């Protein structure tokens, strides 16, 4: 492994914040179960940092720290494969290890299942050993590998819980700052500019919090919807008024679920890591159209041939195109067939991509406002929540581009956004 890879591995290990901390009941239970599955008296959860092997929790013996150079698990844990030796004294790579020779131990049977993160970094291993020769079945080896995966999942859950707690604390602090800012605003007009800045920063943190909370709101809505459907089956057959009430409640839940989905998309567009790479705009457009196939409803979509390769995050750009194309299908005119065109033209070291339709259009006075959160041209129409274009704005901003709306010749809306050209970025690099 390269020095750079080792530095990234160590960073991943320290990010989990599990070294030199109590293992907890769950991890201790997994290690005990591993020993039972293997049918051996000794098991340990080993974490390997720069210089040492830390035995986080053990079964059958009292653990501690040892030098990494003495560790059996350090020999091959970064390969990512399970190491299984019925008798380690017969293997050249381990026969002279102090844990085998009697200096630190007299290990014969040895199995090491590496703890590999979702990003591919090995943190250490789930280690089983015995002072006698011992053999396992393929089924036992597979299950021990599964238990190593469970340990990493527990690490992940701890890390996420810690991050959520820090985020909640930060949002609470921001909320308190916002309340103080409101009080200060009443006392002095001179502080107004500072108060607005605090408000915007607080809103940004609350948007991040919304991404976490909205996910938790969706699950109970699904449960409520299920019970309403059961009530509809039981009561709706004989009671028309109950059927109307239940139908209204189900439709309200549907609207709430769509709003939560929109808020989650908005939050993820701003929080998800930006993984820019050469992305084929034509392929992303086809994928977005495939996602929207239920909404096309007879619309004609012309995708210009030879759409460019841009330097962008494919997932976010696919979401951007899906939002823009979805708006074109949603806000079509009833007096003519819906027609949408996707095109691109070079503009210096970037591309200007346009999604043009012949729909209802956006009044000139509102073309800047529609990119604001919850802004709608016609709220009474009930066709959306004013989140889609603000999500598009976030995505384009994160790519260093700009986005704006104009009128399509002959009527309708054309949304234009800019993205870096992948070839120019590669040449500059």
Image (cartoon, rainbow, N blue to C red):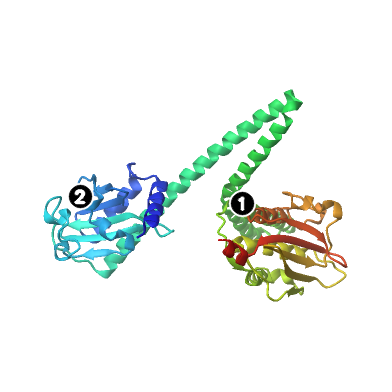
Check contact, mark 2 vs mark 1: CB within 8 A: no
Q: Which mark is residue 11?
A: none
Closer to the camera in the image, 123 or 236: 123
Q: Is residue 303 above or below residue 399?
A: below
Question: Quadrant location of residue 338?
Answer: bottom right
Dot 1 corresponds to which residue?
Answer: 270
Q: Position of residue 401 (x, y in %)?
A: 68, 56
Q: Residue at x 65, y 30 (%)?
A: 179
Q: Relative to 118, is 141 on the left or the right?
A: left
Q: Secondary structure at mark 1?
A: helix
Is residue 177 visible in this depiction of the protein?
yes
Work out whether mark 2 precedes mark 1 in sequence or the reverse, and give the earlier one: 2
Is residue 237 visible in this depiction of the protein?
no
Dot 2 corresponds to which residue?
Answer: 60
Question: Quadrant location of residue 412?
Answer: bottom right
Question: Quadrant location of residue 227?
Answer: bottom right
Graded by Cα atoms within 10 Å as few (under 14), some (14 to 19) or many (20 or more), the crowding at tag 1 reads many
Q: Position of residue 142 (x, y in %)?
A: 31, 66
Q: Residue at x 31, y 65 (%)?
A: 81
Q: Position of residue 153 (x, y in %)?
A: 41, 54
**Which of labels 2 and 1 is toward the front?**
1
Closer to the camera in the image, 38 or 148: 148
Q: Is residue 136 above or below residue 151?
A: below
Q: Is residue 170 above or below residue 58?
A: above
């Amino acid at each position: 492994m390269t020095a750079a890879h080792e530095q990234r591995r160590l960073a991943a290990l320290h990010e989990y914040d599990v070294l030199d901390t109590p293992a907890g009941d769950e991890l201790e239970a997994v290690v005990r179960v591993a020993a039972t599955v293997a049918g051996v008296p000794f098991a340990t959860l080993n974490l390997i940092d720069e210089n040492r092997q830390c035995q986080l929790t053990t079964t059958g013996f009292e653990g501690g720290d040892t030098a990494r150079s003495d560790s059996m698990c350090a020999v091959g844990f970064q390969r990512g494969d399970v190491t299984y030796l019925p008798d380690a004294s017969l293997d050249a790579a381990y026969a002279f290890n102090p844990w085998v020779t009697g200096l630190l131990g007299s290990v014969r049977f040895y199995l090491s299942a590496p703890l590999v993160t979702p990003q591919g970094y090995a943190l250490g291993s789930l280690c089983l050993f015995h002072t006698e020769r011992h053999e396992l079945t393929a089924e036992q080896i597979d299950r021990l590998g599964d238990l190593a995966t469970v340990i990493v999942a527990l690490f992940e859950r701890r890390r996420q819980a810690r991050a959520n707690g820090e985020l909640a604390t930060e949002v609470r602090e921001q909320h308190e700052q916002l309340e103080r800012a409101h009080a200060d605003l009443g006392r002095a007009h001179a502080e107004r500019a500072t108060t607005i800045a605090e408000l915007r920063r607080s809103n940004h943190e609350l948007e991040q919090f919304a991404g976490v909370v909205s996910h938790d709101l969706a699950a109970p809505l699904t449960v409520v919807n299920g019970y309403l459907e059961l009530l509809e089956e039981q009561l709706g057959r004989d009671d028309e008024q109950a059927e109307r009430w239940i139908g209204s409640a189900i439709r309200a839940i549907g609207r709430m679920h769509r709003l939560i989905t929109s808020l989650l998309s908005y939050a993820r567009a701003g929080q998800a890591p930006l993984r820019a790479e050469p992305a084929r705009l034509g392929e992303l457009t086809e994928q977005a159209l495939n996602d929207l196939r239920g909404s096309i409803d007879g619309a004609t979509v012309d995708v210009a041939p030879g759409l460019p390769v841009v330097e962008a995050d494919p997932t976010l750009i696919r979401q951007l195109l899906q939002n823009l194309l979805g708006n074109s299908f949603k806000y079509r005119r009833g007096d003519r067939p819906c027609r949408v065109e996707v095109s691109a033209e070079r503009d210096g070291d970037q591309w200007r991509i346009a999604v043009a339709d012949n729909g209802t259009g956006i009044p000139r006075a509102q073309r800047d406002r529609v990119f604001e959160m919850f802004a709608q041209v016609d709220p009474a129409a009930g066709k959306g929540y004013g989140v889609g274009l603000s999500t598009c704005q976030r995505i384009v901003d994160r790519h260093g581009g700009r986005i704006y709306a104009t009128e399509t010749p002959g009527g309708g809306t054309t949304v234009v956004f800019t993205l870096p050209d992948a070839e120019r970025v590669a040449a500059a690099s």
